[in-house]
Image (cartoon, grey):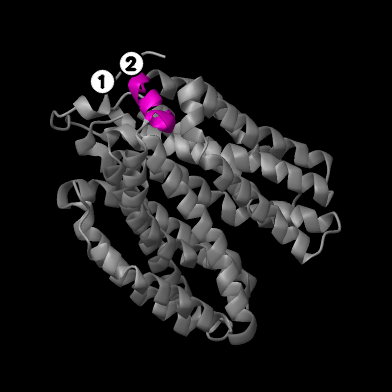
Amino acid sequence: MSAALPEPEERLEPPGPGSVWAAPGMLALAVLAFCGFSGYAALLPVAPLWAVRGGADSGGAGMVNFVLLGTTVATQFAVPWAIGRWGWAWVLSLGMVFLGVPSLLHIATDELAALLVLSAVRGVGFGVLTVAANAAAVLLVEPARRGAAVGAYSAALSLPLVLVMPIGGWVAEDVAFWPVFLVAALPLAGIPACVAVARHLPVRATHDAGHPEVEEDAATSRTYLALLRPTLILLGITFAGGSIITFAPQMVSVPWLSAAGLFAVGLGAAVMRWQVGAVSDRIGTDRLVPVAVVVTVAVLAGLAWLVRSPVGTEQALAWITVCAFVGLCYGTLQTLTMLQAFAAAGPRRVGTASAVWNAGFDTGTATGSLLVGWVAVGAGFGAGMALTAVLCLLTLPLALIHARR
């Protein structure tokens, strides 16, 4: 790999003119993100349905995505080390293989045990994709354009979540499962983009991001401590996001309202993940986070009030509107906390920041679903979503603390 860009800490010049997409490697990163996240989004709602088709009960079906997220989090902390040992091209490409090949193998079996193994392998691939691609987004541009780069990358990965995930279940149940499995293998088509991205990443960044063992213990401890604040803020919003994605069908009385609500969440998140990065470059990330947290708490409180009983067609407009606002808050805080994490870790620990942020995201998504499910069993989804509003509110003091620069 060639050092097409200078080391991150040396690039002190002001941002160049033109779109962030003009930065070498950014378009390839967008292709990589779109292909990789298509593989993730296509099977997220469909793999559990396939398990049920094979005879699994609801508990077994729930294990499919639990195993996926569990192996994702377990993998994420090893990705920086792997990049330092084998390089960007190999690690990114292997991640796409681990995502794509098991997707095709779903065609051959619907046995729960086999599906759990396939989910575990896909989780390894998704863990690689999330950490390595996030880190690449900030290393391809100068620090002054980091927000715009993260926003552009986030827009590319959000498209499959908006377009693919909401219709996957409908295609599987009303047409056939195999077209969804083919779409889920799209990461394999993104392997050439992995190689293209790697050509433009600084060699030094590979080693700095990938060898925590050469850092002093005290410096490493300070890095993880600095990452605690944005990670806890992220957990607050992902508790809510994971809950809505999981339980939207049970919050409504008409199936199409669930699809409409999830589409509104995904679209709102995609728009804000794209736009808020460039805004933060101008205004400052730390100034935006407290405002975003306050707005999020208000929106989640409104959602909690709305879903005290299953939402019917007469409340369709209110449901879709609130879901859209949830998506706007979801996307805003994802991008802002990611930028806070990279700033807190510093340019030499980009891989560590990416690993911790992504682990926090997936942990919050899984844990939020679990907590809200427990509360909803006894008190309903109104109380469950009210809990997510309270958890977000508890992160406000952290949001008010200015990050050390």
Query: Is residue 7 positioned above or below 44 on the image?
Result: above
Question: Which residue is tagged 2?
Answer: 3
Is residue 213 or residue 255 the one in the foreground? Answer: 213
Q: Residues within 10 Å of mark 1 (few under 14, many from 20)?
A: some
For this view, does 338 lie left or right of residue 242? left
Label 2, residues with CA under 10 Å away: few <14, some 14-19, many ≥20:
some
> Residue 251: horizontal and vertical position, in percent?
58, 76
In the image, residue 212 lies in the stretch drawn in magenta: yes
Position of residue 31 measured from the top left corner of the image (x, y, whole percent): 47, 32
Check whether the beta carbons of the residues at disc 1 and disc 2 lie within 8 A of each other: yes
Q: Which residues are magenta?
A: 200-214
Quadrant in which the N terminus appears: top left
Place of residue 273 in the rendered image (x, y in percent of width and height, measured from the top left): 36, 51
Residue at image point 64% right, 81% down: 377
* Residue furthest out toward the left: 14
> Is 294 displayed left or right of 161 in the figure?
left
State the mark number for residue 6: 1
The answer to if 234 sits in the magenta stretch is no
Q: Main secondary structure of the magenta part?
A: helix
In front: 384, or 259?
A: 384
Above or below residue 57? Residue 276 is: above
Per the model, the C-alpha gap separating discs 1 and 2 is 7 Å
| Vertical placement of residue 237 versus 26, above or below | below
- In percent of width and height, residue 322 lies at 42, 73
Describe residue 358's horizontal placement relative to residue 13 as left or right: right
